[in-house]
Amino acid sequence: MKIGSLEIDSRYLIIAGVILLLVVIFGVRQHANRQAQEVADGIISEVSDYVKVEYNSVRGEILGSAIVLNGVTVAPKSDPEQKSEIDRVQIQARDFSDNGVPYTMNASIEGLAIYIDDMKPDDARTMRDLGYEEVMRGNLQFGYKYDLDESHLSLHDIGIGIDDMGSISFDLDLGNITPDKRDLMNLLFTHQEILVGDFRLHYNDDSFIPRIIQYVADDTGMSEDEVLEMVIAKVEQDIRVADTNFARESLKNLKSFLENQDSLSITARPEEPRPLGRLMQIQNTDDIIEYMNISIEN
């Protein structure tokens, strides 16, 4: 490339362009980081009466409106020595309302340290008997999306996972959630007009069931295969005497779960969203199962 009497190798232009791009990105990232720290510190100050939160670093993602905290410790204000250590916290929010409430949010807590010594003595003993280390690691996640036009709130991927144990999560669709009804803590389970749609509770095993089988085998002197065969035989017996189709199909799926040791789900797929007020009035379990079209699957 030639500019006037000066000839410039195109490779240098590419390099200069890349350097310029990196400078711009670095500047934007620094600005995002400053904003992220302001937001993070603001959130922490809101809960400072209840918990003490500290972190090693914070950064803002250029894309996605995300805030990432690394090296987080959380302790109750009443007992600052009872600290929980977290590797990473990420919060992503977008589509904000006029008063700053995000219509869409996804949050995750990664590498939450769970100390067996902090558990109740019986629970701690059980965890050790099942072969877990003194420090277990877990992850938490939470997500929701609110559609203002449809007055629809979708809660998704809300759950917890623990390494070498498993994960449990749920999804839930809610209707007739208008802006004045989005104080979920106070209104979610009291407002009669809220509509309950599809629901799914999902468990995915990660060696927890095999550990239980091994524990029972060691305790009884049986082999692990014998323990599993005994449990499955009991389930098969229950299938034969089940008096409803729901019980029969649920037990069949439970048997499959025990055989494969993979995953199990409880789902609700009502023909149409059901009023929460009506659902809370139903006392009979069989009626709830039919009303919400509940099934157990794997």
Image (cartoon, rainbow, N blue to C red):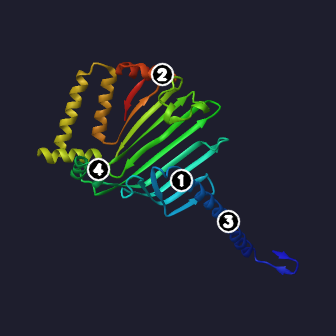
Q: Residues within 10 Å of mark 1 (few under 14, many from 20)?
A: some
Q: Amino acid at mark 4?
A: Met
- Which percent across, then down, holds residue 228? 21, 40
Residue lying farthest bottom?
Answer: 5
- Which percent across, then down, holds residue 223? 15, 46
| Residue linked to disc 1 | 45
| Residue linked to disc 3 | 27
- Which percent across, then down, holds residue 275? 50, 22
| Residue linked to disc 4 | 119
Q: Residues within 10 Å of mark 2 (few under 14, many from 20)?
A: some
Badge 1 marks a residue whose secondary structure is helix
Residue 222 shows in the view: no
Q: Earlier in the sequence, mark 3 or mark 1?
A: 3
Q: Amino acid at mark 1?
A: Ser
Disc nearest the viewer among 4 and 3: 4
Q: Amino acid at mark 3?
A: Gly
